[in-house]
Image: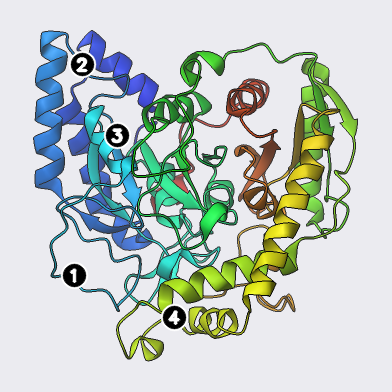
Amino acid sequence: MSSTHPMLTASELVAAYSSGELSPVEATRASLDVIAERDQDYRAYTLVDPDVALDAARGSEERWRQGNPIGWLDGVPASVKDMFLTQGWPTLRGSLCLDRDQPWEVDSPVTARMRENGLVLLGKTTTPELAWKAVTDSPLDGITRNPWNPALTPGGSSGGSAVAVATGMGELSVGTDGGGSVRIPASFCGVVGFKPTGGRIPLYPASPFGALSHAGPMARSVDDVALLLDVLATPDPRDPAALPPPPGTYREAVRRDVRGLRAAYSPDLGYIDVDPEIAQIVVSVVAALSEAGLTVEDANPGFADPAEAFGVLWATGAAKWLDSFPAGSEERVDPGLRQVWERGRTYSAGDYLDAMAARAALGIHMGEFHTRHDVLITPTVAVPPFEVGHEVPPDSGLGGWPEWARFSYPFNMTQQPAITVPAGFTGAGLPVGLQIVGPRHSDDLVLAVAKLVEEINPWPTDRPAGMWG
């Protein structure tokens, strides 16, 4: 539970609570100690509240002492990205333009469910302003750094959450994912990140990014992600698009036998340039999956890059949100976000409807693809982590983050469940993720295939010495 010992998963923590080996207070203090010791190096958190966390931990400790925990994750230290409303704490979304000194009286569905199930909220994690890009730096919080190499980006926009989980600053976190923002940083930081089917985790208030936006659990194991999804996948009347309760529990579904299921492996979706080292790492895990009993076929899904339609949906959502900001905000927001704002204002209602039609067509296409293939496997990101302070890899010639995030945003448009699990390390010691995508409403299947990947390709339970400085 310290920087010199292997970190426990949430599942292991709960087992230790049940046996009396550890208490929620001890676990919470250990997480707070790591934050105090290391977060100045990484900037995973924008807000930490030890008093609130320890008070919640004491309540959990008493419930465990009495043998009456209120959930499968009661007492587990966790965090939420600073995009979710959290009663008693400001939600500034990485921006200097929002007023910190106002009443913060509402919990989002995510934070409400976590409290109701006894999780210990340590604080809120960093995000780029309005979660607009796939790296994590902001005018409010500065630069968040990758724990495997602090000179590199952890990805984004849920970069703070990924760093917190990877370094033991809490066992669990919840991020948002509008174009890869859970999966990209999870891949760059060597953790598990899941974007479930759209509507599976209710959102409030509704995101200006519309159907692109999802919430997603992040953890150091697939089992932990499944446990957290059980907590979060509860309908909330404030989200009219929320799905009904799942038919069973994800903590049980994750152990489903998936051998014999049909998997399509696409190394590049037919149009993506992939770093050769990443491609080799992922294909080796795919080969191991085939040996383990998954029926794998090389097959591209056969759609063209939907970048244009995604760009319209993304920019119009950003412009709608930013138009509600106080006068003078144009000069205070992230310069890159300001460009997106300006571009979003140029699109017409017709442009938006055309993009929505393209999104629908892509969803229909993928629905048909999954009549032949139970899941699709790809790399999670086409490039390894790169230097902090840049939206794209330096000297790459790329124009913006979507150009290196092409494996992720198509599946926001289709609202399909997609998970990243660690696949291996580059020669420079940087994590590489493998992505598993399933048809809509197949969250249980995607988790079960991810569990198989984890079983045949175990990830180290401790961390290299360099991670701890």
Residue 21, given in percent of the width and then of the height, sits at: 22, 14
Say whether marks 2 and 3 touch (CB < 8 Å).
Answer: no
Q: Is residue 295 left or right of residue 316?
A: right
Reading the image, the residue beneath label 2 is: 69
Mark 4 residue crowding within 10 angstroms, few (<14) / some (14–19) / many (20+): many
Q: Earlier in the sequence, mark 3 or mark 1?
A: 1
Q: CA distance from mark 2 to mark 3?
A: 15 Å
At x 57%, y 31%, the residue is 459
Find residue 282 and report its horizontal and vertical position in percent: 76, 40
Q: CA distance from mark 1 to mark 4?
A: 18 Å
Q: Residues within 10 Å of mark 3 (few under 14, many from 20)?
A: some
User: Dot 2, crowdedness within 10 Å: few (<14), some or many (≥20)?
Assistant: many
**Point 55% across, 37% down: residue:** 196
* Horizontal arrangement in the rendering, residue 274 relative to residue 340 (left or right): right
Residue 320 screen position, x and y as percent: 47, 73
Near-viewer residue (105 or 388): 105
* Residue drawn at the location 28% of the way across and 42% of the way down: 111
Q: Does residue 348 lie above or below 404 as drawn?
A: below
Kind of residue at disc 1: Arg
Residue at the spot of label 1: 100
Q: Is residue 387 visible?
A: no
Label 2 SS: loop
**Helix, strand or loop for disc 1:** loop
Residue on which the image places disc 3: 113
**N-terminal label among 1 and 2:** 2
C-alpha gap between disc 4 and disc 3: 32 Å
Question: Which of the two discs, 2 and 3, sits closer to the camera?
Answer: 3
